[in-house]
Image (spheres, rainbow, N blue to C red):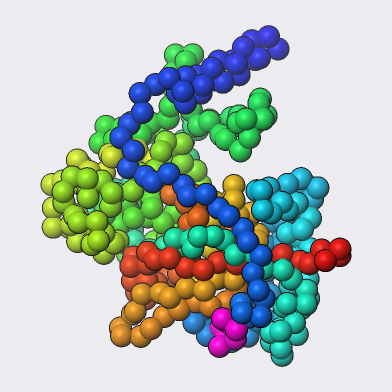
Amino acid sequence: MIKRRYYYYLILILFALISGCSPKPPVLEPEPEPVFYQKADPDKLIRVFSQGLENQGLKSWTQLKEPVERSLAYVRTRNQESEAVCLPELCLKWRDIRETLEAFLILLPDIDRNDQVLKYFFDFYSINPDILLTGYYEPLLEASRHPHPEYPYPVYAVPDDLMTVDLGSFHPRWQGQTLVYRLYNGRVEPYYDRMSIEQKKVLHGRNLEIAWVNDPVDLFFLHIQGSGRLRYPDGQFQHVLYAGRNGLQYVALGRVLVSKGYLEPEEVSMQSIRKFLNENPHLMHHVFPYNPSYIFFTLADHGPKGSIGQILTPFVSVAADPAFIPWGSVMILDAELPQYQGQLNFVSGPVLVQDTGGAIKGRHLDLFCGFGERSEFLAGKMKDRARVYLMVIKNDQD
């Protein structure tokens, strides 16, 4: 027992040293912007999405039944009396999120007939100032189940020496923080970074490969998106899903390319980054390691799944920072999306917080755009401000 307690204290001391004393690398990510909630006028809000849900691929509100049930399944697992979010302007327990979802589920057929029903049962809180809206999608990768010269790039499962500890169980100020580490000669060390895994091949020969792909750029974007689909030479498809990460800081490659003078800030998109890498393959080994974060995967017949462990719904599921917007929450999103093939795209309707991501901090939402060419285009180009409203069941005292 004494040795075990000493072991955990060693981890905590190391975390404190890493957090507070070691030199910090150049900051390539902006600090998360603070979130402010303000009660919104429901009449003005309802007019925003009265034009319909067709741009979300929905024919009616009742088609939200399964996505809402998925959020509800997750929220019911939480301690209902603990805080889901508590900011100066708004403090909610998980019970409030659950009751919102339960009421919303029951009312879906009524909302189809008259969306004014919403204002009698729910309050709406705008997130101020406007949030940054980006997109992600499910990429397609050409893959092999077995090693092959035409498919030289491995997709790795979670290594057995990757360990985690919940720091919040040791001190309240570390609530929600997890330390990812490995043991080396009895010492706690950060887990291997991208350079060690991809260029030094420290995981080679450990039977961790679950598939091999033919394109290093596609693999890099799979790590950014968090899940995708593999297409094997026999024409069969399989989902490849997020299973874990090495715990190191995510650094956006677009910012790296701007800092190196390869791209201008206004031209950064997934498409421009891919174009640069394809035209300069000799620079991949130089720029990829600037993002030390590395993702591990698992194969599945169904997906993709978000952080709540539930299957995502295109143009309904969003990734958010759970420190400010609780998982499972219902929100109204009012956003104009990039034009695709000359067609104006927008979302003015309900979305569900079912995921998160290493780059999603503060006032930032990531809209899941699904699978296919249109989804890839929209996700790659989407980077604009949007209005977002958190929907909460009315308090009996209101």
Q: Position of residue 11 (x, y in %)?
A: 55, 20
Q: Nearer the viewer, residue 202 or 151?
A: 202
Location of residue 338 with respect to 367 vertically, above or below: below
What residue is drawn where x is 46% and y is 41%? Answer: 245
Q: Position of residue 326 (x, y in %)?
A: 64, 54
Location of residue 171 with respect to 314 vertically, above or below: above
Q: Magenta residues: mostly which secondary structure?
A: loop
Q: Is residue 104 left or right of residue 297?
A: right
What residue is drawn where x is 51% and y is 23%? Answer: 15
Outermost residue toward the top in this view: 2
Location of residue 397 with respect to 81 vertically, above or below: below
Quarter residue 95 falls in: bottom right
Q: Position of residue 80 (x, y in %)?
A: 79, 50
Q: Is residue 91 visible?
A: yes
Q: Is residue 183 left or right of residue 168?
A: left
What residue is drawn where x is 36% and y is 28%? Answer: 24
Q: Position of residue 167 (x, y in %)?
A: 61, 29
Q: In which quadrant will I find the N terminus?
A: top right
Outermost residue toward the right in this view: 396
What residue is drawn where x is 76% and y is 66%? Answer: 393
Q: Nearer the viewer, residue 75 or 81?
A: 81
* Range drawn in magenta: 47-53
Q: Is residue 338 left or right of residue 317?
A: left
